[in-house]
Structures are given as structure tokens and as C-alpha cells.
Image (cartoon, rainbow, N blue to C red):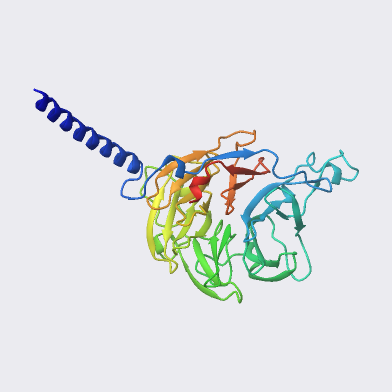
Amino acid sequence: MQARTGKRAWHATIALKAIISFCIGTALTIGLPGTSRPAFASEIPTFTVDPTWPKQLPNNWILGQVGGITVDWQGHIWVIHRPRSLTDDEKGASLNPPRSKCCISAPPVLEFDSDGNLLRAWGGPGEGYEWVGREHGIEVDERGFVWIGGNADNDNAILKFTLDGKYVSQIGTIAPSKGSNDTTQLGKPAETAIDKEANEIYVADGYGNHRVIVFDATTGAYKRHWGAYGHVPDDAKQAAYDPKAPVAQQFGNPVHCVKIANDGLVYVCDRINNRIQVFKKDGSFVKEWFFEKNTLGNGAVWDLAIWPDPKQSYLLSADGENNEIRIIDRENGNVVGSFGHNGRNAGQFHWVHAMAVDKQGNVYTAEVDTGKRVQKFKLTAPEALH
């Protein structure tokens, strides 16, 4: 009897170990179908808003709609805003006679450190170039150049400056667009990305054109371009987005972002079509993911930031129509988390338009329409960087 009881206990122990092993295995992989990377909850980034960032601007300055935000190689945060978007009550001190004590528009380009201190500010019309009509998009490369664009009717160029705001050169001109297959002129470009090793600049082009186009970052020489699925882009009028219709074979307007991962994959925001398309650097199509496919209005995919862990495990995606940031597994497109909500309080958004992330995993966001602000979200899960 004692031997039989011992045998039952031994079998029970083996069964319990098998169940525990199965449960652990399931817990490691749940939510990440088709991958072998464990989905520990502590690996997924989480954030809390820093309501003190940035610090009060000097000179009675105020921001208008913030058309772009980026983090440079030093960890400094660069912002481009739209002075002409300020209302009279917002810029009351600049009127003649002054309407109120506050405020005066800040220069269009501002540089902050991670603590929110203003380091530099410049921009606007100058000698040798024509400034854009509505500021949109900013990128800073490791060679020390600042690239800016615009999306007003004739903003069909990107302009290149030094860190101190000295004009260097431009690609395209402030003049009418020539369409999505012209190699000299842009079409209201939304955003740029730098491939440091190849010395190339990728342009999400844009609010007028339906393509990604690549140039030499030093000479401005044309390299290549492509549309959705790697097709030759087409400027034929497109039907309004319909979630029940067949998927669009061309990018809608705007082609709103382009990002380059360390493994050579290129991510493109097709904002109005609620999708991210993924390419190789030569324009070969790899895959696409849809998000909040029933979203109408201005679409659900506005900007992307690549997570700074060694594997670049996640994409963070700004959704200005639903006013949230999605955390996306970069391997399979699964949404593993989100933060933000429509609203006016710290940590909420109104038309979150652009975003960036620094090497410490802090997220910076920019809002347009009546949002007109930047915010910082501190990483609260440091394990997500390992």
C-alpha cells in the first residue's frame, strides 16, 4: 500500500511539472504568434508624462502648431513649429498696439536638452533661400546638418542648414510640384530620414506626391523612388478611404513618415490608409500592417519612432486621429501596448502629429491643430531597453 501511494505521488509530481512547464511556455509566447522572442511584460515599454517639460521659454515666446520633432545624436530634442498658426490672442504682445502682455512667437526651429532647457532657436526667411510656407518635418544628421520641410501649396523642397541656422543647400524649390515621378522637385514633403552609412536622405513625399524618394545627402543627387508596394507612383485621383473597399495600390496623401531600422528595413506611414508599409532600401516591398482600420478622418498612422534597444524590438506609432501612441512588435506588427487619450491634460493629446525617442527610452511628442505643444514621456520600464 505504501509503495502504491509513493508511485501515485511520483506520477502526480511528474504531471505537475509538465503542467507548470506548459504554462510557462505559454506565458512566454502569448501575444507574439510566430515568434520565439519571450513576451515578458517587463520588456514592454511603459511611460509617465513629465508635466515640467519643456521649461518656460524665454523672451515671452510661445509655440504654434508643432510640425515636427526629432532627437539628434547628442540626445538633444529639435522642434519645428508654425508661427503663422498663432491666433491674435496667443501672440497679443506682438500686435501693434499690443493686445496683452503675452506672447511673441518663438523662432520656427528650437533645440532643447533632455531636461527641457532651450539651447538654440532660429529660422525664418533669410538671404539666399526662400523659407517654407507651413513648417513640416525636421531631421538632424550626425554630420551636423538640420533638414526642414513644409506642406503649403508650393513647399516642394527640403532645406538644409547648419546647427546654428546657416543656410547650406536645398533639394527642390519653393515652386509648383511636377508630380510623383519627377526627380528634381518634391511634393509637399512630410518628413525625412538619414541613412548615415550610405549618406542618403529618404523623403516621405508627401502631401502632394505619393512616394518615397531618396537623394545623396551631400550633393542632393537623385538616387531612386517608389510608391506603395514598390510600384511606380501614380498621381491619379484616388477615392476616399473606405475600410470595406479593396486596399489601395498607391499611397494616399499624405505619405507622412519614413524611418530606417538598423537591419535595413524602411518603414513608411500611409496615414489616410491606416497602414505601415515595410520595404528594403532599394524599394522592394516586404510587408504591410493595418491599424484601427475603421478610422476615417485624418487616418491612424501619423508617425513612427524605432525603439532604441539593441534589437530595435518595437515601433512606437503616433495616431493623431485616435490620439494615442501604439507600441508595436517590430517583428510581426502586433500591438503590445498603448498610451495617451484625446484630451487637454498632461499626457493626453489633440492631433498628436509627430514623435521621437531618445536613447534612454524617453518619448517626445508634438501636436498640431489647436494642440500646439510638445510633451515628454519618461520611460518607467528600464528593462525594455535590454
The outermost residue toward the right is 97
Residue at x 70%, y 53% (from the top left corner): 113
- Relative depth, front residue between 178 and 378: 378
* Whole-percent x, y for residue 8 in the image: 14, 28
Residue 175 seen by the camera: no
Locate residue 103 relative to residue 2 in the image: left or right: right
* Whole-percent x, y for residue 65 in the image: 68, 47
* Whole-percent x, y for residue 341 in the image: 55, 35
Residue at x 52%, y 41% (from the top left corner): 46
Residue at x 89%, y 45% (from the top left corner): 96
Q: Quadrant of the N terminus?
A: top left
* Whole-percent x, y for residue 296 in the image: 48, 41
Give the quadrant of residue 186.
bottom right
Residue 353 seen by the camera: yes
Give the quadrant of residue 373.
top right
Locate residue 211 relative to residue 12 in the image: left or right: right
The outermost residue toward the top is 1
Q: Is residue 208 above or below residue 347?
A: below
- Relative depth, front residue between 1 and 219: 1
> Total marks drawn?
0
